Image (cartoon, grey):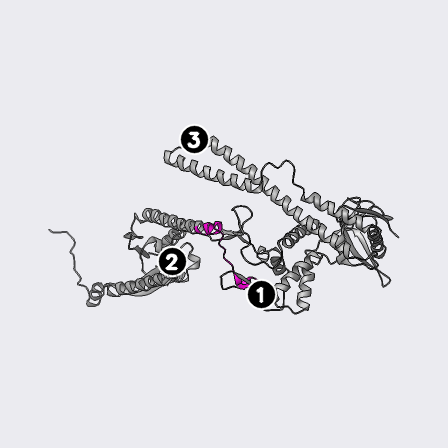
C-alpha cells in the first residue's frame, strides 16, 4: 500500500504569472564631473551627459533617475560638489538603485571620502559601477580594488597639486607677481598689467603713514578718516582698524610685492594657513611705483613692533594704542611697569592722576612704594626737562647725529652677509636633493645619514643667524628713522615749549621714569637723559 503523501500542484494565478514575467525597472543615475571650467572641459562635460542619457534610456529594464554633474569643481572634497551630495541624498531616500560613473577618479580623488560613500551606499543595496575599471561595488572583491584605485586617484591629485605649487613658486622666483586689486587701496590695474597709483587715494595713504609715525593710534586714524568722510576701498565711509593696519603693513605701498604670505596645507582640506616660516617667502623689490618711501615704511614697521612690545601686560590693558603719549612712556622706577591715567572723582570734583599699573591691579603685592602723580605737575616737569635740554639744542642735535652713526655702524663679528647666507642655504638645499636622489636610486640611505645630519645642523644655524640679522637690521632702520625725526623736529622748534603737545612728546621723549614723588628722569631720543624735580 502506497503511504507517500499526495502532492497537489496548484497552478499559478494569471495575475502572479504576469507579475513574474515583468521584471522590475531599475532606477539608474549617472554622475559626471570635469576638473576645470575652460571651454574644452565643458565640452567634455556636455558629452558625458549626452552619453549617459543615451545609455540609460536605451538599456532594457533601466529607467532614468537623473544625471548629476558638477562643473569646474574639485574632486578632492565632496563638500564642494553640490550635485554629488544631492545624488547621495536621493540614494538614501531610496530613489536610486544604480549609480554609473566613468571612473574612480571622476567619483572622488579623496580615498577616505570615496570609501565612505561607497560603503554607505552598499549598505543600502545601491551599486556604483565604475566603467573604466569595470568594477561593481556590490561584488565581493570590489573594495580592495576600489581602495587601490582611489589611492592612485588621490596620489594623482596630490601630484597635480604639487606641480601647480611648483609652477607658482617658480613664477615667484622669477619675480612674477599676482595682485588682487579688489581689496588694494590706492592702486588699480595699469595698462602694463602692473599697479597704477590712484592719486587722491595715494594722498590718504601718505597721511595714514605720517599720522602713525607722529604717534596717532589706529583708532585715532580711523576717527580722522571718518570725520573727513574719506571713502574706504569699497567706497563706504566706515573704516576699520584692521584695514588701516593692513595698509600700514602692506609692502606694496613702497613698491615691493611679498609673495607666499599664506599657503594651502594640503590638496584635500585646502585649508589656508599663515606662513610663519614653514615655507620661503619671495620679496620682489621695486615691482611697481611706490607711494611711500621705503625708509618710512620700515620706520612704521619698527614703530608698530615697539608699540606692541611696550603694551602693558595687564588683564585690563586696552587693545588699541592710547591717545596719551605718557601711556606708552611713563614707567615705574621701582617695578618697571607702565603707569596708567586715572580719573578720581570726590565731592563732584575731578582729579586726573597717573598710577603704576601693578599697584592698580595687584595692590602692594609686587610694587610697594610707587607714588601717585597728578597730571598737571607731571606735564610741567616734563616740559621743564625738555626746555632745559632745548637750551643746548645744537649739542643735543650733535648727540642725536652720533647716535644715528652708532646705529649705522656694522655689527662686529659677523662673518657672512645676508646674501652669503642665502647662497649657502641654496647650496645646502641642492646637495640635500642630490643625496636623496642617490639614496633612492641605490635603495639605501644608511651611508648618507651622517652627511645629511651635518647639512641639516648647518642649515639650522644659518637660518637662526639669518633671522637674527634681519631682525637687527629692521630694528636699526626703525631706530634711525625715529632718531632722525626727533633731530628734525628739535631743529624746527622754538627755544622754549610752553604748551603740552602729545605729538611733540611722542617725537622727542623715549621714556619717563618715576624715581619718587619728587623726581623723574626724562630720557630723550638719541640717549640724552634729564633729571627733573616735580613742582
Residue sitting at 26 percent across and 63 percent down?
55
Q: Who's the residue at 31% across and 62% down the image?
A: 48
263 to 59, vertically: above or below: above
- Mark number for residue 198? 1
Which of the 4 image quadrants contains residue 468?
Answer: top right
Tell me the tag on residue 35.
Answer: 2
Give the SS element for disc 1. Answer: loop
Which label lies toward us, 3 or 1?
1
Q: Which of 265 and 111 is in front in this view?
A: 265
Q: Give the range drawn in magenta.
A: 167-188
Splitting the image into 4 quarters, where does residue 501 fall?
bottom right
SS assignment at label 3: helix
| Residue farthest left in this picture | 1
Q: Distance between the residues labelled 3 and 2?
A: 42 Å
Q: Counting residues from the N terminus, which is met first, the one under dot 2 or under dot 1? A: 2
Q: Work out whether residue 26 can be spotted.
A: no
Locate residue 364, reporting x and y percent: 80, 46
- Residue 4 lies in magenta, yes or no? no
Q: How many other residues sit within 10 Å of disc 1, few (<14), some (14-19) or many (≥20)?
A: few
Q: Which residue in the protein does label 3 denote?
A: 446
Q: In the rendered structure, which disc, 3 or 2, sits on the residue that comes first in sequence?
A: 2
Whether residue 510 sits left or right of residue 54 in the image: it is right
Amino acid at each position: 500500500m502506497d503511504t507517500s503523501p499526495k502532492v497537489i500542484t496548484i497552478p499559478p494565478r494569471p495575475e502572479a504569472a504576469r507579475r513574474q514575467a515583468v521584471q522590475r525597472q531599475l532606477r539608474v543615475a549617472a554622475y559626471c564631473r570635469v576638473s576645470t571650467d575652460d571651454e574644452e572641459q565643458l565640452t567634455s562635460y556636455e558629452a558625458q551627459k549626452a552619453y549617459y542619457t543615451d545609455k540609460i534610456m536605451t538599456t532594457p529594464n533601466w529607467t532614468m533617475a537623473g544625471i548629476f554633474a558638477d562643473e569646474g569643481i574639485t574632486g578632492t572634497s565632496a563638500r564642494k560638489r553640490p550635485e554629488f551630495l544631492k545624488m547621495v541624498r536621493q540614494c538614501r531616500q531610496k530613489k536610486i538603485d544604480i549609480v554609473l560613473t566613468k571612473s574612480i577618479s571622476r567619483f572622488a580623488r579623496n580615498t577616505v571620502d570615496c570609501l565612505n560613500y561607497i560603503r554607505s551606499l552598499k549598505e543600502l543595496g545601491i551599486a556604483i559601477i565604475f566603467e573604466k575599471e569595470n568594477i561593481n561595488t556590490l561584488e565581493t572583491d570590489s573594495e580592495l580594488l576600489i581602495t587601490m584605485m582611489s589611492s592612485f586617484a588621490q596620489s594623482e591629485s596630490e601630484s597635480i597639486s604639487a606641480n601647480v605649487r611648483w609652477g607658482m613658486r617658480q613664477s615667484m622666483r622669477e619675480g612674477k607677481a599676482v595682485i588682487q586689486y579688489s581689496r588694494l587701496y590706492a592702486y588699480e590695474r595699469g595698462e602694463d598689467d602692473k599697479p597704477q597709483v590712484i592719486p587722491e587715494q595715494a594722498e590718504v595713504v601718505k597721511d595714514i603713514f605720517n599720522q602713525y609715525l607722529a604717534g596717532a593710534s589706529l583708532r585715532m586714524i580711523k576717527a580722522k578718516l571718518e570725520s573727513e568722510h574719506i571713502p574706504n576701498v569699497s567706497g563706504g565711509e566706515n573704516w576699520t582698524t584692521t584695514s588701516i593696519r593692513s595698509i600700514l603693513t602692506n609692502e606694496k605701498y613702497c613698491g615691493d610685492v611679498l609673495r607666499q604670505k599664506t599657503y594651502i596645507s594640503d590638496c584635500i582640506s585646502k585649508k589656508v594657513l599663515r606662513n610663519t616660516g614653514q615655507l620661503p617667502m619671495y620679496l620682489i623689490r621695486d615691482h611697481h611705483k611706490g607711494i611711500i618711501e621705503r625708509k618710512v615704511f620700515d620706520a612704521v614697521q619698527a614703530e608698530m613692533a615697539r608699540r606692541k612690545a611696550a603694551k602693558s601686560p595687564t588683564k585690563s590693558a586696552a587693545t588699541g594704542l592710547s591717545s596719551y603719549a605718557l601711556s606708552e612712556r611713563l614707567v615705574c622706577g621701582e617695578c618697571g611697569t607702565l603707569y596708567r591715567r586715572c580719573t578720581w572723582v570726590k565731592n563732584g570734583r575731578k582729579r586726573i592722576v597717573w598710577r603704576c599699573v601693578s599697584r592698580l591691579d595687584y595692590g602692594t603685592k609686587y610694587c610697594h612704594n610707587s607714588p601717585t602723580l597728578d597730571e598737571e605737575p607731571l606735564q610741567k616737569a616734563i616740559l621743564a626737562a625738555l626746555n632745559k635740554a632745548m637750551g643746548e639744542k645744537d649739542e643735543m642735535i650733535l648727540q642725536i647725529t652720533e647716535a644715528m652713526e652708532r646705529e649705522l655702524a656694522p655689527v662686529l663679528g659677523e662673518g657672512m652677509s645676508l646674501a652669503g647666507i642665502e647662497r649657502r642655504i641654496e647650496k645646502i638645499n641642492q646637495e640635500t636633493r642630490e643625496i636623496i636622489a642617490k639614496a633612492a636610486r641605490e635603495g639605501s640611505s644608511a651611508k648618507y645619514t651622517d652627511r645629511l645630519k651635518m647639512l641639516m645642523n648647518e642649515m639650522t644655524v644659518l637660518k637662526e643667524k639669518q633671522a637674527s640679522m634681519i631682525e637687527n637690521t629692521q630694528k636699526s632702520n626703525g631706530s634711525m628713522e625715529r632718531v632722525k625725526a626727533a633731530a628734525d623736529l628739535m631743529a624746527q622748534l622754538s627755544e622754549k615749549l610752553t604748551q603740552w603737545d602729545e605729538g611733540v612728546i611722542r617725537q622727542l621723549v623715549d621714556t619717563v621714569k618715576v624715581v619718587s614723588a619728587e623726581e623723574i628722569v626724562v630720557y630723550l631720543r638719541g640717549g640724552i637723559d634729564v633729571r627733573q624735580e616735580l613742582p
